[in-house]
Amino acid sequence: MGISSDIMHDFVAKEIRAIYSSCDGWKITERPVGNNYDRIAVIERCSNGHRECVKILVTFARDFSSDLLDELKKPEPVYDGTVARNSFAVMIPANANMSSIPAGLLVHTMRSFAFDGRELAWVKKPVRKEEAQKAAA
């Protein structure tokens, strides 16, 4: 048996790994929060004797709900005695309502999902020109 996860979260995990690469020492773990569809991605690494921790709230909602900020801003426990540097961010679909996101909170916009009016849509990669010509022929 393998791990079962939603394909939407798989696309978002790829986007997070593009920002916080494992080549730079980042380790990513995710956990559900809120309605169990929203997630918090905890990204950690040790650098120069300090533990860096970035918590990203991933939500697919059009309007940002501030009730999840308490869970996001809670620092992760450190058990090895190092000093932790915590930072926090939010990842939302493109064209989402950003007016309710507090100032100073880093916002990442999803490339894979966007709102088209009131509906959440999957943003597909554009078809290459050569492939389109082959398909037309």
Image (cartoon, rainbow, N blue to C red):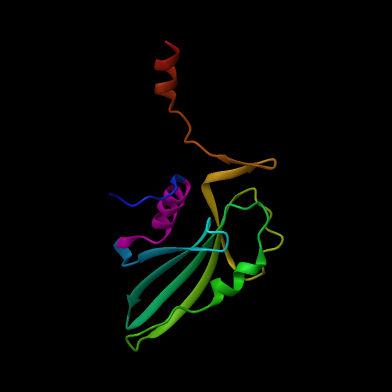
The residue lying at 55 percent from left, 72 percent from top is 71
Residue 39 place in picture, x, y as percent: 50, 60
The residue lying at 68 percent from left, 55 percent from top is 63
Question: Picture quarter containing residue 69?
Answer: bottom right
The residue lying toward the viewer, choosing from 76 and 112, is: 76
Residue 1 place in picture, x, y as percent: 28, 49
The residue lying toward the viewer, choosing from 100 and 7, is: 7
The residue lying toward the viewer, choosing from 21 and 56, is: 56
Residue 29 place in picture, x, y as percent: 39, 64
Residue 134 place in picture, x, y as percent: 39, 16
- Part of the protein shown in magenta: 8-22
In what quadrant of the picture does the C terminus appear?
top left
Magenta segment, prevailing SS (helix, strand or loop): helix
Magenta span includes 12: yes
Magenta span includes 17: yes
Above or below, 129 relative to 52: above
